[in-house]
Image: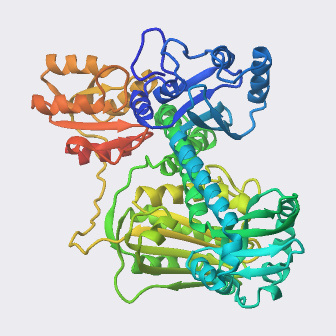
Amino acid sequence: MSSSPHTDHTSPFEGQQALYTGLNLVDQGFALIDEDLRLVAWNATFLRMLDFSDNLVEVGTPFESVIRYNAARNEYGDGDVELQIRQRLDAARSFQPYAIEHVRSNGTVLRIHGVPVPGHGFLNLYSDVTAQRNAEKLARDLNTLLESRVAERTVELRRSEAQMRLITDSIPALIAYFDQHRIYSYINRGYQDWFGLDPSQPQLVSTRDYLGLETYSQIQPNVTQALQGKPATFEYNIRTIDGRTLMARTTLIPEIEPDGTVIGCFELTFDITEAHRAQELLVQAQKMEALGQLTGGLAHDFNNILMIVLGNLTALSEQASSQAQVTEFINPAIDAARRGSKLIRGLLSFSRKQPIEAHTLDLNPLITGIEELVGQTLPATLNFVTEVGDTPTLVSVDPQQLQNSLLNLILNARDATDGKGTIHLRCTMQMMDAHNAAQVGLMPGAYACLRVDDNGCGMDTATRARVFEPFFTTKPVGRGTGLGMSMVYGFAHQSGGSVDIQSTPGTGTSVSIWLPVVTPDAGVVTGGVLVNNANVAEMGLALLVDDDLGVRQTVRRLLLDLGYSVLEAENGTEAMEILDQTPQIRLLLSDIVMPGEVDGRQLARHAINSGRVEHILLMSGYAAEAEQPLEVPLLAKPFSKAGLLAALQEAGA
């Protein structure tokens, strides 16, 4: 895949030009290889980052060719070229996740992250981190300079204890000095703030006591290394006197006499909790974005398949000669197709391509309704408690998707407690400043927080890192699809919010959904009744446009059953010619994503501008995007005759 189409290669995902155009705009390169180590898909950024020409790669190009090309231009440094190629091919064949950094011959630093894509191959993501690494080198150089100056000034600072304490107590860090016997002779005020230690009596400080035995054992090898004359930098979790758990980074700089004897170490410790959290959020967002792009594209093809299956099975059930055949054979197949459609909707929700019908609503009565809904289904041994505010909490969301998200969280909490604990659902309104908002990947502002707490089994770090991935589940086989938390993630982000998990094994889990609050409005949501119009009179001429022949055959039958005469076109250009030459067309029903220069939206715009087509309806296996140009109704595949009829009625047909 390149930034512009070429006649000598074919897009690996036919009919998804819009997706590829979007992928070419991202600043990350990607390349997907299949199980035979052949290129399946890539974007223009991949070619640009590695200085590949458009004609170097095509669908099916062996990955070995790319590696050999890089080796030939000395991208892997000096050495045996064939050995370099063989080592990289052996690593690729293992299909194991990896994350490395590679410095190109031109000095560019690339961060390369590889993840297996079950059933499809292996996905490589490329990020240019040159500027970041240069900044880090500058920081290291400055830190080295600072450390050097600290060492040079040690004698002078010992003669001016008051001045040194004034300086070090003003730095938002822990600064200390201990001798070769690991006895402290100096600690700054940071130790008092974090651990309650007395800076005036550093000789009484015990690292084992203030850190705890587990953390102390973890850092011991680094202390030993520093006392042997080698600087050490390491990261670890610590618990402060006020109950906070922080991620700390400590640097130990040995003080060495001219004869090489280590007489002590300078210690510098920073709180890197926020930076670590920001990095976790970035990695999580990148991973979820990559998965979302893949699932969104695959869902389009599956929806077309299910459209054909469901449409034909429904037609067959209406014409079957025996009701027994319908009950025994056809209805189970229809139910299975509908379950497949529900599964695809879950994937679309995760990838944030599921249509939403956002309305302004008050969360407080919704939570009360949830309590009534689950109150009779939860076991009597489980205590379910809700808590809402005294004033309305207004958000703009899809009520059904919000309800489904809360039910998912409550049922997960039920399973985590084994039905014998407490689940607490509460709704609060909070003003998020820049610091707190950044912790959950949001902009500062007013947010409603829906939080589900349980005192169940909790999750370890590895589980928490994967909990939002599609199909990931810790439940036994048959107890879930693994899409519940994925849908919660997609709903929260598609609604302009975020979701956050705090959990510790053995103590329980807290899941928070953050949604931006809105000002009150007078909008009222009303519902309508679907009228069965199956036996209507002749409805006129319809133009059906879809590049999938099976979909056209299925939808054509539905339109005929509803009383339309049908013309067909397999792409937008052909459909535009038919519209121009056939003024009697009353209904245009078109897919959105099609090959060629004219897609469904452009076709709809052309039909509106002509002024001759009374009713226009778009359909898509991608489901609705946030933008629906020209206020044209959109119908998500797969759909039944009743679903098509309802959409036509909405379009005024």
Split into 4 quadrants, where in the image is the C terminus?
top left
Using the image as rendered, state which of residue 283 and residue 435 is in the foreground.
Answer: 435
Residue farthest along the left direction in this orientation: 611
Residue farthest along the top direction in this orientation: 8
Where is residue 633, by image quadrant?
top left
Q: Is residue 266 above or below residue 186?
A: above
Taking the image as drawn, is residue 309 in sight? no
Q: Is residue 95 above or below residue 416?
A: above
Taking the image as drawn, is residue 106 in sight? yes
Q: Is residue 433 above or below residue 342?
A: below
Query: What percent of the width, then of the height, locates residue 306?
Result: 51, 36
Q: Is residue 255 above or below residue 113?
A: below
Q: Is residue 259 left or right of residue 9?
A: right
Q: Is residue 80 left or right of residue 158?
A: right
- Who's the residue at 75% across and 15% down the image? 81
Where is residue 562, by image quadrant?
top left
Total numbered labels placed on residues in the image: 0
Query: What percent of the width, then of the height, locates residue 432?
Result: 42, 74
Q: Is residue 457 left or right of residue 129?
A: right
Where is residue 326, by image quadrant?
top right
- Who's the residue at 53% across and 26% down the image? 42
Query: What percent of the width, then of the height, locates residue 500?
Result: 55, 66
- State the colouring used for the structure image: rainbow
- Who's the residue at 57% across and 75% down the image? 171
Using the image as rendered, state which of residue 243 and residue 130 is in the foreground.
Answer: 130
Using the image as rendered, state which of residue 542 and residue 92 is in the foreground.
Answer: 92
Query: What percent of the width, then of the height, locates residue 473?
Result: 69, 55
- Who's the residue at 75% across and 37% down the image? 96
